[in-house]
Amino acid sequence: MTDWNPALYLAHAGPRLRPALDLLNRIDAAAPADVCDLGCGTGTATRLLAARWPQARIVGIDSSPAMLAQAAAESPPGDRLTWRQADLSSWSPPPASADVVFSNAALHWLDDHATLLPRLMAALRPGGVLAVQMPDNFAAPSHQALFALARDARWADRLVPLLREAPVARPAEYRRLLAPLAADLDIWTTEYLHLLDGPDPVLTWTGSTILRPLLDRLDPAEAKDLAAAYGAALRAAYPADADGRTPFPFRRLFLVAVAA
Ligand SMILES: C[S@@+](CC[C@H](N)C(=O)[O-])C[C@H]1O[C@@H](n2cnc3c(N)ncnc32)[C@H](O)[C@@H]1O
């Protein structure tokens, strides 16, 4: 697996931050002692957690060395804020060790939410909060166009096994999983109308996320062809408005569960 590209990911830092703020604002926790940020990436949301709870010990966990290096460059680890490299598919937090487990735009990269989410709930002390936001845009043209191109006979054998076409379940499924473990549970979806700037802005957006692993599996000429075809499909699906900005509707699923 190749690494993430922090600079490309941060190209749309503003719109990417908004859902993290909306998730953080929904958490009702006055003075948590131990907070984890799962899939912390470059630490943008982790720093918001640190600012909101100045007394808390906060650990940002991510599998990407490049994202963690960027996080540590901006916020060197100290007594209160630490960064840890781990793969969340195998990493288990100690039971009843956290007051807040936060994850913004990361858990859709992990499979088997039916096992993962109860495991994360078990990490909470009673009254602790699991707060998760995941993209829920897999049926949108931004994603469907790429899934269709990946099925091209030139590379389908390599790309189709990498596709994550429906990694996020319906809200009712998360309720079924979490309600037995939660004293309080709130699940909702929001469709943002992100306004993106610059040339090929949707390609820049998805280029750092869903496109990246596919390009990495192709040789350079094939990667160029796939990116060109995908860019053309995105320009047709998401034209710029008269003011030069490109509206990009993007639905996201949120869940906030308070441990019983
Ligand atoms: C879209 S970024 C979100 C980063 C950050 N939470 C934010 O809001 O800016 C997704 C992050 O999830 C991390 N990630 C994906 N799969 C992971 C896994 N299995 N274990 C740990 N981190 C993972 C990636 O390395 C990446 O930094």
Image: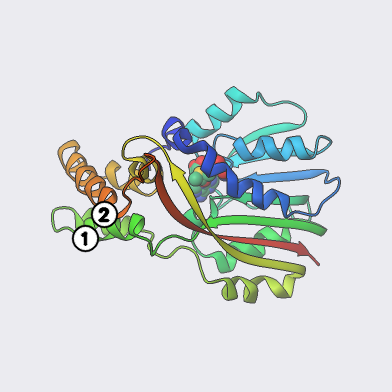
Residue 86 point in image, percent of width and height: 56, 42
Labels 2 and 1: the sequence-earlier one: 1
Q: Residue, x 44% and y 30% (percent of image)?
A: 7
Residue 77 point in image, percent of width and height: 68, 26
Q: Quadrant of the N terminus?
A: top left
> Which one is closest to the eye, mark 2 or mark 1?
1
Left or right of 57, for residue 214: left
Q: In the rendered image, which quarter is residue 139 located in?
A: bottom left
Residue 31: which disc?
none
Q: Given contact means CB atoms under 8 Å apart, are the residues at marks 2 and 1 in contact?
A: yes
Pointer 1 residue = 151
Q: Residue, x 60% and y 26% (percent of image)?
A: 72
The answer to whether residue 102 is visible is no
State the SS at label 1. Answer: loop
What amino acid is at disc 1? Answer: Arg
Pointer 2 residue = 159
- In 3D space, how far apart are the residues under numbered discs 2 and 1 (Cα atoms)? 7 Å
State the SS at label 2. Answer: helix
Q: In the rendered image, which quarter is residue 181 located in?
A: bottom right
Name the foreground residue: 206 vs 242.
242
What amino acid is at disc 2? Answer: Leu
